[in-house]
Amino acid sequence: MRIGIDLGGTKTEIICLDQNNGKELYRQRVPTQKGSYESTITTIRGLVEQAESTLGQTGTVGVGIPGTVSRDTGLVKNANSTWLIGKPLDKDLSDALGRPIRTENDANCLAVSEATDGAGAGKSVVFAVIIGTGCGAGIAVDGRAVPGINGIGGEWGHNPLPYPTAYNPDAKSLYNAFEAAPGATDTLHTYFTDDVKLSEYPGPLCYCGRRGCLETWISGTGFKNDYHRVTGDPMSTHDIIAASKAGEAKAVAALHRYADRVARGLAGVINILDPDIVVLGGGMSNVDALYDLLPKIWGRYIFSDHVNTALAPARHGDSSGVRGAAWLWARGEAA
């Protein structure tokens, strides 16, 4: 049996899967005890003990966390759930459960889930994106997570937005300072704007301390903030999407700005990683228009005559992360 734990900021979820066919055997969610590391350990131990008692069998345990365990120190880093930072989570859970456990970033768990039996099943390289309140991503190659030597594989959200449009009311003279090309001035609008509200440079301040990170533009929060910045109207992400479906001009324009930014970000990934498929998860993955818009746009930025990379929503929806945690132990693999 494969047991997966999704340690989220608001809820902690457990799932038990048949290790041969992936059938769901058990699932439970409880509120996350915020701020208490000891309660986190106790909660996970209790969930595992209850699940195994109910099913009458034991299993391997994989845990998805909103951060990563440093290879250098063995301690959690880069975690939204700040009470985990600096703690030896995998060691303490292994001691509490009396067995080896595996931890992985939650976005990598999404990638593993979708590569195993989701939208990326049968694909060699899967790039799985989470675009919700924040922005993250994970990589799976042949069904296995690729965390990288620094444990930050797939962290595209803290790369800068590519090709940002800058405010300059005298753009033509600045542009002409560089090499000219036939028809080059026709593309001036993609590099400069005379409307300061449409400027993307230097970009919004990110919690990491830098400006212009992809997360500040293409998360659901970034989408909402951009609409407010340009129109002056505060609206929820849900209401902006609904307005765009109804054809409201400001909302449609906001969605097209958003799609172009996502396409620019993904183009950089495709140029480097060249994945078989990009899988979208998180709240913004439910915007159906993106699956039509992105493939039409990203070819402008990808260094290839044809783009065969597929694009699809996560097949398992918000259950994909916890399923991926379970599949940190592959089918047929002994504990």
Image (cartoon, rainbow, N blue to C red):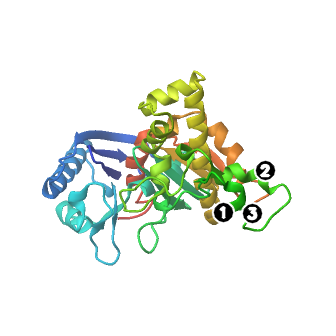
Q: Residue at x 17, y 61 (%)?
A: 96
The type of residue carrying mark 1 is: Asn
Residue pointed to by mark 2: 186
Classify residue 308 as left or right of residue 34: right
Residue at 27% over, 43% down: 11
Label 3 CA crowd tier, 10 Å (few <14, some 14–19, many 20+): few
Which structural element holds mark 3? loop
Residue sitting at the far bottom: 72
Of badges 2 and 1, nearer the viewer stands: 2
Q: State which mark lies toward you, 3 or 1.
A: 3
What residue do we see at 44% from left, 75% from top? 149
| Disc 1 element | helix
Relative placement, left or right, of 178 versus 131 is right
Q: Nearer the viewer, mark 2 or mark 3?
A: 3
- Closer-to-camera residue (59/91): 91
For badge 3, the amino acid type reads Asn
Query: Which label belongs to residue 271?
Result: 1
Which of the two discs, 2 and 3, labels the residue nearer the N terminus?
3
Provide the residue designation for mark 3: 176
Percent position of residue 1, x then y: 35, 52
Give me the C-alpha separation between circle 2 and circle 1: 25 Å
